Amino acid sequence: MADDAAPDERPFRYDARAAELFENKWQSYWTENHTWEVANPSGPLSDGWDDVAGRPKKFILDMFPYPSGSGLHVGHPLGYIGTDVYGRFLRMRGYNVLHTIGYDAFGLPAEQYAVETGQHPRTTTEKNVETYRRQLQRLGLAHDERRAVSTTDPAFIRWTQWIFLQIYNSYCNEEGVARPIEEKIAELASDPTWAARTKKEQSEIVDSYRLVYRTKAMVNWCPGLGTVLANEEVTAEGRSDRGNFPVYKRPLTQWMMRITAYADRLLSDLETLDWPEPVKLMQRNWIGRSTGAHVDFQTPAGAVRVFTTRPDTLFGATFMVLAPEHALVDALTTDDNRAEVEAYRAQAEKTTEQERTAESREKTGVFIGAYATNPVNNNEIPIFIADYVLAGYGTGAIMAVPAEDERDWDFAAKYGLPVIRTVQPPGDHPDDQAYTGEGVAINSDFLDGMTMADAKAAMIAWLEEHGVGTGAVTTKLRDWLFSRQRYWGEPFPIVYDTDGRALALPESMLPVELPDLEDFAPRSRPDDPDADPEPPLSRVESWVNVTLDLGDGPQPYLRETNTMPQWAGSCWYYLRYLDPTNENAFCDPVTEQYWMAPNGVDLYVGGVEHAVLHLLYARFWHKVLFDLGHVSTREPFQRLFNQGMIQAAAYTDDRGMYVNANDVVAEADGTFTLNGVKKVNREFGKMGKSLKNSVTPDEIYASYGADTLRVYEMAMGPLDVSRPWRSDDIVGAHRLLQRAWRAMVDEATGDLVVTDDAIAPETRRVLHRTIAAVSDDYANLRFNTAVARITELVNHLTKAGVCERETAETLALLLAPLAPHIAEEMWQRLGHEPTIGFVAFPEADAAELVDDTVTLVVQVNGKVRERVEVASNADAATIEATALALPRIVELMNGNAPRKVVVRPPALVNVVV
């Protein structure tokens, strides 16, 4: 039947109407029959365990979505479809597969929207979650819906707060392992002076060891958002990654997590992970491990400690620079210099960290009137403050060696400070530039003539011998700022007594839930870095002021009014998937070990944009839980796969404003216009609401069906490569499914057209080669080539004009991971009971993978002279005879008998004449 026949002549054609019918039918069947629910070895979800106990397991995980108000666009499901195809394939290969999805539902976007509209963020969030859930379900994802969680669910909040308390009630011992804080308290209490201290003094000492602590530190204050931000949440331009507001450095008392205690383990354990190398490199660079020495410079206000990776250059240190915020600046500044110093500090406070450290920025500073003593030669060197030195990095102080550091050279040149070379530069090195390369030590007393490595070692030994320094290892990684002055986040399970001591709530009082607010907007002034934080929760006096019995009878307490950052829930959500209905533990130990051992999540798929933030934080939480015996693996995610991005054309007018891509017309001359009138410019970028170029899955469902969307997104290119969305191309995926359907079903009558004949030899060969290739492609996440192989098979069947039953059944099985709804329908019409989802994936016949013929290369005296097709199983005698009979070879032999014939079956003959 011709493709252009009228629709009413083909009532059983696979089209959008049929796709919707099949998809609704099979999604309802899966739900009603609990098809994708997977059993645990123990606990509330253990029903059916005996049926799967003998199967190997796989835990497949997607980075769960943040449910925004605009819903999904077609770029969002790329990774979800990929993992679903992989999971379905594994089930057909006999695996017990855990796969589900939840919602990362706390955070700034919902709260910002709530502030703008007055709608409560819970209302917004729940509505958005429901939209996402509906759109994802329509894709036909084989998820165990019982395991879906939202970070805003009270049951989930309870265990997030519980994990926080596990970390809070821990410290890191000398081996770098988290241990219960009670062990440290017992150690401290063994000191005879301990009992004489007040409770507050004891509390302060204990708190200084905890993995979660409060401190006054330089933080990223964003008045536009009314909250502080972690370093990872600030862009390279010194603005917030949410809202693009300016961010300033300010000293504030905040909750911190001591992630630096795990820096070495976070770094070394990267080598055990099957992750993309670029992601590992990003984490290595973020941790930034450096070896060198701590050196003490004496000043009138006491010793100032610096860290340097180049202790061999100490004899060239001619001045010292402190961060404007350094704790000793006030004490060291002389009266004559104080006004200038204070003015400079005020200016620096209003400058972002990125602006302060930009290489292209002119270096500025102010002499504070004091001097420090260089410990290696007792020279007095002037002390400056300069904004290119940051209080939050290193010790907030540097020794300046202008001869071997370009920034220090520029600073010294500007302020007329001395330069002493301590490394011999090559002869052609300019005299007016710093030298940062290798060379022997000069002008350095006992180091002269040493190589850089030897000089470093010798200087560290000297510093330690004289008690003015030590060898040291530092990292760029800073402790994790864990406070947010916002409403929409997990409350801390912390209260304060009348002495101001922070006290952890007992597990029986969890969860601590947010109070309902009408005014949840933070007091923010975007352009005022001096604005003080005012958490919305602080305005709810009835919630803040509580009377509790924490063991000393009813006492008044104040609740913590900051909330946890959005990252809290995403640090551990994958563990709750394992045992989401357990009310007695965040996860049953037997269940955790079954799904996580031996190395963690088997496959984690998500965007590379989370390389530092989420992945680093989650690894830290997981390692603490491992140390405390709550999980069985050292790392959470064994294999990481970064899917690419679906991009789309976006259009801007002459003002640079984005216009709706649906209103753009492609003109014949290659230009683009808005509604055929006004010229616009085209660019390609991330699909999204702000670029006005989103295409929703709902549009594709309506026009083609979910199976077509699945096949198209998998066919667009390798899963880890970004690719442009082209709406015109999706019809190709739809036509593939139409041809596959037509090979089995008469579009006019709906009758099966498959035959019970034996498969034709050529079809059998194509079929089994397709099985082998598609199996390998599915197993290795090469879904685009799997689609290409299936397309070749369908094209062969279309050309052959016949589809045998064995071929039809195999085609349905090959399609099942990619296009599960049409595959289920095919399987049922072929006379089988549903579901196809657990039917064994076909195995290729090895005999059909061997070529019938091979190309025989014939050489004469080592030079290739002829090629000919021979049977792949031909013996040596047959091959020799074939080669010697070739006219070209006969001609070259010129009537002579060969001196020797070397035969290497099945592909080479060398005739020696």
Image (tube, rainbow, N blue to C red):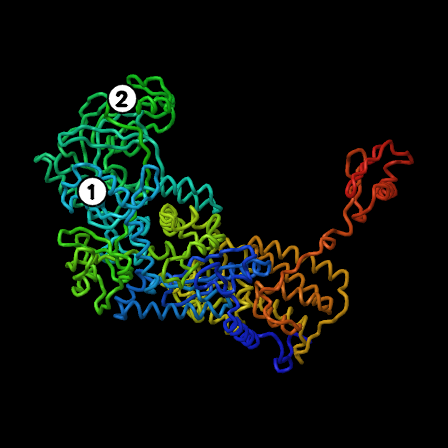
Question: Which image quarter: residue 689?
Answer: bottom left
Residue 804: percent from the left, percent from the top? 73, 68
Secondary-structure class at tag 2: helix
Residue at 85 percent across and 37 percent down: it is 892
Q: Is residue 217 above or below residue 839?
A: above
Confirm or deny contact between disc 2 and disc 1 (CB under 8 A).
no
**Camera-nearest residue between 256 and 44:** 44
Q: Is residue 9 above or below residue 576?
A: below
Secondary-structure class at tag 1: helix
Q: Amino acid at mark 2?
A: Glu
Asked if residue 612 shows in the view, the reply is no
| Residue occupied by mark 1 | 205
Going by the image, does 255 lie left or right of 873? Answer: left
Farthest residue in the right direction? 895
Going by the image, does 737 lie left or right of 907? Answer: left
Q: Is residue 304 above or below residue 522?
A: above
Residue 392: percent from the left, percent from the top? 25, 42
Residue at 27 percent across and 30 percent down: it is 294
